[in-house]
Image (spheres, rainbow, N blue to C red):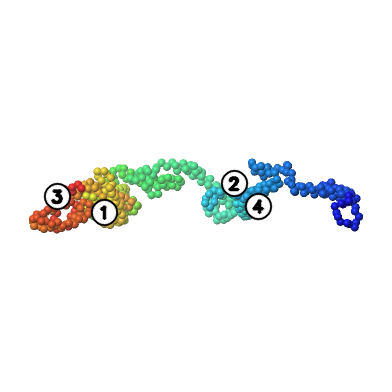
Amino acid sequence: MIPTNTGSINPCSNISSNCVVWQGPDIPCINLCNGDTISDVIAKLAEELCLIINSTATEPNLTGLDLFCVLPDGQTEPSTLEEILQLIIDYVCNITQTAAADPINITLAECLKYNDNLGNLVTVLPIEEFSILLGNKICNILSTITLIQTTLDDHEARLIVLENCVLPCSANNVNEAQVLSSCLIPGGTLINASTLLLEIERVHCNLESAVGSPSLITTAINAQCILGSDNMLNGNSTYSSIPGWVTNTNTLAESNKNLWLVVCDMYQAIQDIKLNCCPGACDSIVYNYTASVVKDNLEIPTNVALNFNTAITSSGYTDCGGSTNAIVTDVNGLTSSSVFNFNAVAGTATSVNVPLTNLNVFDNLNVSIAFCLTDGVNECKETINKTINLTVPCPSNIAATNIEPDGVTVTFNNNLGNTASYIIKLINVATNAVTATRNVTAPGTNISEIFTGLIDLTDYAIRVTTQINGKESVCSDVLFTTTNFQCLEWQSAPYDTSITYSYIDCNGIQQNRTETCSSPICSTTICGRSIISSTETFSLTGGPCPAN
């Protein structure tokens, strides 16, 4: 082929491209082989170049392209390369945004759940926080394993030391602890611990054989037939009143203690029977007394008076030890006593006084006298207890004063000191309703409480409750009736010219008046509660104020 599209004149001779041969390697993709002419080479390269130009200059063939995973539901499949590339870019961007908006959350296993600072149970965590939690748990586990391993190593070392101290290395080489027995194996020398153990076992078995097994001991304890509520044979008290008595026995020692207390009581009762079963001096002795309370002028108990005028003594007998002791005990366990000679006061009017100083005299008192007379050979004994019932005293002078149509003043004297307290109630007698209540604490000597708001011409009861030392007494009611508003009448003396007076009207308001008398005899009538002052004398007409 000779070139024809050039106008230049080359000094070289024109050679046909068909005469030039390709000496390069084979190129399979364009079907070019070594030995092809340059014309064939250029032609094939030109064809491939045209294909490339056509592919880029026009839309490529998109047949077989699957857009299933990136194409939104209901959207038409794009037909151009630009639309396809944009669809893919949008899909990738959406993946990034979705991942940022919806973090991955991990549900915690039961052992990893915990309460946050507000006390809420945490069961789900984002994957980042879950990773941190898991890492902390793993670190804690590793630390615990390390601590356990250290502890095991320490225990192993201690076990080795312990085995070396206790266990024998061989039958002929026993490394045993040496102990000193103080009572089972006398001699004061060190012995093997196993020897002492065998001796303890032998003594224990012998002791159980002699005393009984624990079950037999329990059966013996439960065989107790005398209870603390049973009456003593000697005296008027129950066994539970004996000092040292165990109500619910659980040991052989406690049961044996109760047994001895019963035996001692029986011994004393049998001794009394022996002395008194048959006619003798003790039969003629009568231990009897009365106990009464002596009060001061304020009605406060000061002494317990013991009278023995009905008691009978016996000739030749005197008080054991030379005297008898009377003991008074209050509810708090405090006591007061008085020593006297029973043989001297029996059958007489002489009283024995026991002072009540420092005792609670507003509750029951117990009087106990352990009588004992002896003739030097025999003893006649008897203990008599008496209870004196005391209550909190009530004021003796409760009164209703300054009685008005709608008010009253309640007064009485406080003789119990400032530790006492009083509750004052006004009760409508007709309805039994409490109209007013007043609590008086830390009172002085004189109590004066003003009550208002009452109904005129109505019966009321004053009910006082006295309280002291945790006890109280409700005193007898004191009755009163409210008054009515009255009319007052004044009549002047002859030739009086005026009257000036002040009074409290029916509404409780003070009124001041001056009236001039123009006649030889003048009179006036007013209705109110009371006259405060007047230049003349007023007198009640005896009638109530008129309505309105």
Amino acid type shown at disc 2 = Thr
Question: Is the residue marked by circle 2 packed among few (<14), some (14-19), or many (20+) residues within 10 Å?
Answer: some
Please name which of the two marks, 2 or 1, marks the residue nearer to the observer: 2
x, y (%) of residue 183? 52, 53
Could you give the CA–CA distance between mark 1 and mark 3, rounded to whole angstroms?
A: 31 Å
Task: Give the left or right position of residue 207, taking residue 242 as reference.
Answer: right
Please name which of the two marks, 1 or 3, marks the residue nearer to the observer: 3
x, y (%) of residue 139? 62, 53
Q: Mark 2 or mark 4, which has the lower sequence index?
A: 2
- Reading the image, the residue beneath label 2 is 107
x, y (%) of residue 128? 61, 51
Amino acid type shown at disc 3 = Thr
- Reading the image, the residue beneath label 1 is 449
Q: Which residue is nearer to you in this view: 479 or 533? A: 533
Question: Is the residue marked by circle 3 packed among few (<14), some (14-19), or many (20+) residues within 10 Å?
Answer: few
Please name which of the two marks, 2 or 4, marks the residue nearer to the observer: 2
Would residue 345 be seen by someone viewing this image from the given angle?
A: no
* Element class at badge 2: strand
Please name which of the two marks, 4 or 3, marks the residue nearer to the observer: 3
- Reading the image, the residue beneath label 3 is 541
Q: Mark 2 or mark 1, which has the lower sequence index?
A: 2
Q: How many marks?
A: 4
Q: Mark 4 or mark 3, which has the lower sequence index?
A: 4
Please name which of the two marks, 4 or 1, marks the residue nearer to the observer: 1
Q: Mark 1 or mark 3, which has the lower sequence index?
A: 1
Q: Mark 2 or mark 3, which has the lower sequence index?
A: 2
Could you give the CA–CA distance between mark 4 and mark 3, rounded to whole angstroms?
A: 126 Å
